[in-house]
Image (cartoon, helix red, strand yellow):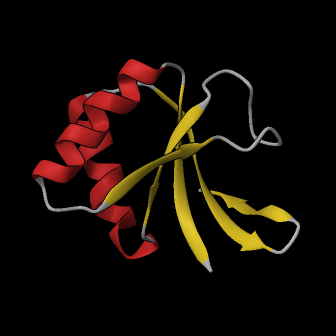
Amino acid sequence: MKYGLIVFYSYQHGLMTEKMLKKNNIPVEFVPTPRSITESCSHSLKFGLESLRIVQNLLQRLNIPYKGIYEVERIPAGYKIVKII
């Protein structure tokens, strides 16, 4: 299963983004950030890739700093980063 993962510099930026995405009916979920991506923020927002363009537009419009958006695949051994978006 593939999904999008927004990695932030701070937990507060994640909370602000979660609030705005949910307000725009985008289902998101806080998940632990895989260590292979970063150790800067312990939590990231998981979302369906079908919402990618809306997520990117909202992040740009709100001017919330984030480290990156990743396409991630869940595999039996954990996570696999498919690509950086």
Which image quarter holds the N terminus?
Answer: bottom right
Residue 13 figure quarter: top left
Q: Could you tell me which residue is drawn at 45 percent across and 22 percent down?
A: 11
Give the total number of marks visible in the rendering. 0
Q: Could you tell me which residue is drawn at 32 percent across and 54 percent down?
A: 55
Q: Is residue 39 above or below residue 31?
A: above
Q: Could you tell me which residue is drawn at 61 percent across and 75 percent down?
A: 2
Answer left or right for 19 relative to 73. left
Instruction: From the top left corner, tell me how far across and down residue 76 is, in percent.
Output: 84, 74
Q: Nearer the viewer, residue 51 or 31?
A: 31
Q: Is residue 27 above or below residue 7?
A: below
Q: Is residue 11 above or below residue 69?
A: above
The extreme left residue here reads: 23
Instruction: From the top left corner, tell me how far across and down residue 32 is, in percent.
Output: 61, 42
Q: Is residue 50 above or below residue 14?
A: below
Answer left or right for 23 relative to 69. left
Q: Could you tell me which residue is drawn at 66 percent across and 63 percent down?
A: 72
Which image quarter holds the C terminus?
Answer: bottom right
Instruction: From the top left corner, tell me how far across and down residue 75 is, in percent.
Output: 79, 74
Residue 28 figure quarter: bottom left
The extreme right residue here reads: 77
Answer left or right for 55 relative to 45. left
